[in-house]
Image (tube, grey):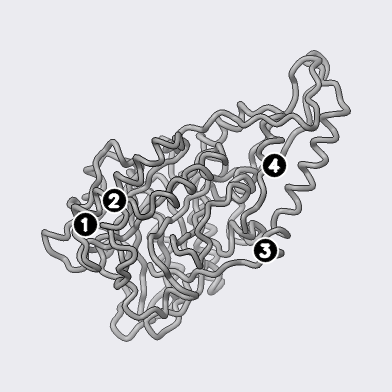
Amino acid sequence: MNTEVSVVPRALCLRGRVGSRAVALRLAAAVAAITLMAASACGPAVRSGSVTTQLGNRGSSVVPPQESTPPALAGKMQPDPHGAYLGIYQPPAPFDVSALNGYSAFSDKPPAIIMWYQPWAKSGPRDFDPAAAVAIYERGAIPMVTWEPWDPGKDANVLKNPEKQPAYRLSKIINGSFDGYIRSFARAVKSARGPVMIRLMHEMNGNWYPWCGTVNGNNPKQFVAAWRHVHDIFEQEGATNVTWVWSINHESVPNNSSNAYSVYYPGDAYVDWVSISGFNWGTSGSATRWHPLDYWYKTPMAYLKKTGKPVVVSEFASVENGGNKGAWITDAYKRFRTEYPQVKAVVYYNKREWQAGTIQDWRINTSKGSRDAYRAAVANPYYLAAPPLTLSAWTGTLTPANWVYLRSLKPVY
């Protein structure tokens, strides 16, 4: 989906992190003052959403406030065999993480994945913000960055011919024109130390982005080469805490064999999760109609299942126009649970936007019926809240000095 990109004012972003910064200062002072006795006391707990990490509990040693040790790198995001993780796209999070505070109105289960978009253009929020990632970890969630090689301008939804951006042709990525930026991004991701999902060059089988395989002088083989090039740079930089998410549009445009899903697949060694996006536009546009989930998902889900990789539904929502949105949401989450067991995470696109000359309001709370349907659907035990197993395993290894390091990372935005 075309996305609106805006740079959040620095003051607003910093306000979103005041809480965690204050905790960091209190932690440093407390750790310096307290002798941690293993036989008699546990260290001070840092509460991260539903993650509680016991700090200290290391005999009689005292960690000086200035001591800072980078944690070991986390592993890749692993699916849970018992269900699918809940996720949310809730702008302006993560640059203002307080935007996530209102999610409790939709569900008692905190989301396990926070998704957002970042372009490669110098005018956009192009740099990875490790401090924002840490703020997400402290909420018990894992970040998923949709990473886009283009210039979306102030609002991607109003761009004319957005796919025609020669500066971002796939050949430019392959020939090394962006290597410096890619390496910088990889180092920043590595500095966050925790698990990070990267959804690179999504919806490549469409015709609306400059990295799509049938536009802008590109072809599908170049997409595969560009993906592998970016992946290899991250490996060279040691950013092995990345989980690579390969994400198709629900249908190929144009829909022919030379633009099939399979021609874009980089190979099992380069992909950790596969993904899909697809929306119920209803009658919000002059040429759109109301359709159930299977209309969009049945065929691509059959293909994704063949990859053997866990699936994340990374962009997913409905409008009210033309039908019963609450019933649509109920049906969709039921189908993910009962018909598509390969789906291991579902990210709801919780945003209102202007596109194709009309308003699409995808938000959960467009009506009481929509909100109640979402709450009831995700209340099913199959849908899993924060924290994911991978995050719990990593935070369980963190020492006080590790937390000092993580909380010392400075916000970029």
Q: Position of residue 54 (x, y in %)?
A: 71, 29
Marks 3 and 4, Cα distance to the nearest angstrom?
18 Å
Marks 3 and 2, Cα distance to the nearest angstrom?
33 Å
Query: At numbered mark 3, what does the secondary structure look like: helix, strand or loop?
Result: helix
Location of the N terminus (image quadrant)? bottom left
Q: Amino acid at mark 1?
A: Thr
Q: Tag 2 or tag 1, which sits nearer the N-term?
A: 2
Residue at x-position 24% and y-position 49% = 224
Q: Amino acid at mark 4?
A: Arg
Q: Tag 3 or tag 1, which sits nearer the N-term?
A: 3
Considering only vertical position in the picture, is 65 above or below 214?
Answer: above
Residue at x-position 76% and y-position 41% = 24
Q: Are marks 1 and 2 in contact (CB under 8 Å)?
A: no
Residue under pointer 4: 407
Marks 1 and 3, Cα distance to the nearest angstrom?
44 Å
Q: Tag 2 or tag 4, which sits nearer the N-term?
A: 2
Disc number at residue 10? Answer: 3
Residue at x-position 75% and y-position 33% = 45
Q: Is residue 294 visible?
A: no
Q: Position of residue 152 (x, y in %)?
A: 43, 70
Disc number at residue 226? Answer: 2
Disc number at residue 299? Answer: 1
Which mark lies nearer to you, 4 or 2?
2
Residue count near mark 4 (Cα–Cα under 10 Å), binned few <14, some 14–19, many ≥20: many
Q: Tag 4 or tag 3, which sits nearer the N-term?
A: 3
Q: Classify residue 331 as left or right of residue 302.
A: right
Q: Position of residue 245 (x, y in %)?
A: 37, 47
